[in-house]
Amino acid sequence: MKLMTCVLVAFILLGAAFAKERPVEKGTIVEIALQNTIQSGTPTHSKIVYVYQMTVQVGCTLYAGAYSSPQQDLAQAYVPGDEMEVSVTKKRLYARFPGVEEFMEIEISSQRSADNCPAGK
């Protein structure tokens, strides 16, 4: 249990370090939904991780990916239209909501142009 917590904290800190080196832009949630739950550990000390599928629009690009969280209510806390600060790399999108200090690390599974963008942008 402590090992899993340490690993999660390390990933969060590593993600935050990389995100701070990249330019931060405005992003908007297009879709967020609970995709899967993963149970790890032993029967007496199990831990549940919730995997969310998220689509975030940054400029004229839609990024879809997965985010793992120990929180079950992430999809209820944030809804389509909510804005966030984002930093995009080739394979990851780092995002944080107003008033939240840490960046979430979202592994990008696909990206495409948004339909609602003016031509030439």
Image (cartoon, rainbow, N blue to C red):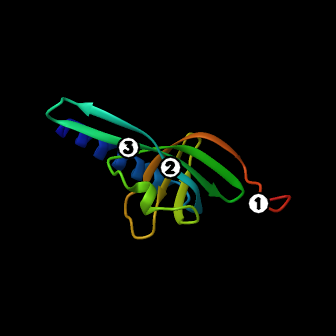
Mark 2 to mark 3 CA distance (whole Å): 10 Å
- Give the SS element for disc 2: strand
Choose between 58 and 17: the one closer to the eye. Answer: 58
Figure check: 82 above or below 8: below
Instruction: Please name the residue shown 54% across and 43% down the image.
Output: 65
**Type of the residue with mark 3:** Tyr
Q: Is residue 38 left or right of residue 97?
A: left
| Residue 48 in picture, x, y percent from top left | 29, 40
Q: Is residue 45 left or right of residue 90?
A: left
* Residue 33: mark: 2
| Residue 50 in picture, x, y percent from top left | 38, 43
**Type of the residue with mark 2:** Ala
Instruction: Please name the residue shown 43% across and 52% down the image.
Output: 104
Figure check: 69 above or below 80: above
Choose between 27 and 14: the one closer to the eye. Answer: 27
Q: Which of the two marks, 2 or 1, is nearer to us in this view? A: 2
**Residue beneath disc 3:** 50
**Residue beneath disc 1:** 116
Give the quarter of the figure containing the N terminus.
Answer: top left
Mark 2 to mark 1 CA distance (whole Å): 22 Å
Instruction: Please name the residue shown 62% across and 48% down the image.
Output: 63
Answer with mark 2 or mark 3, whichever residue precedes in sequence: 2
Choose between 4 and 90: the one closer to the eye. Answer: 4
**Type of the residue with mark 1:** Asn
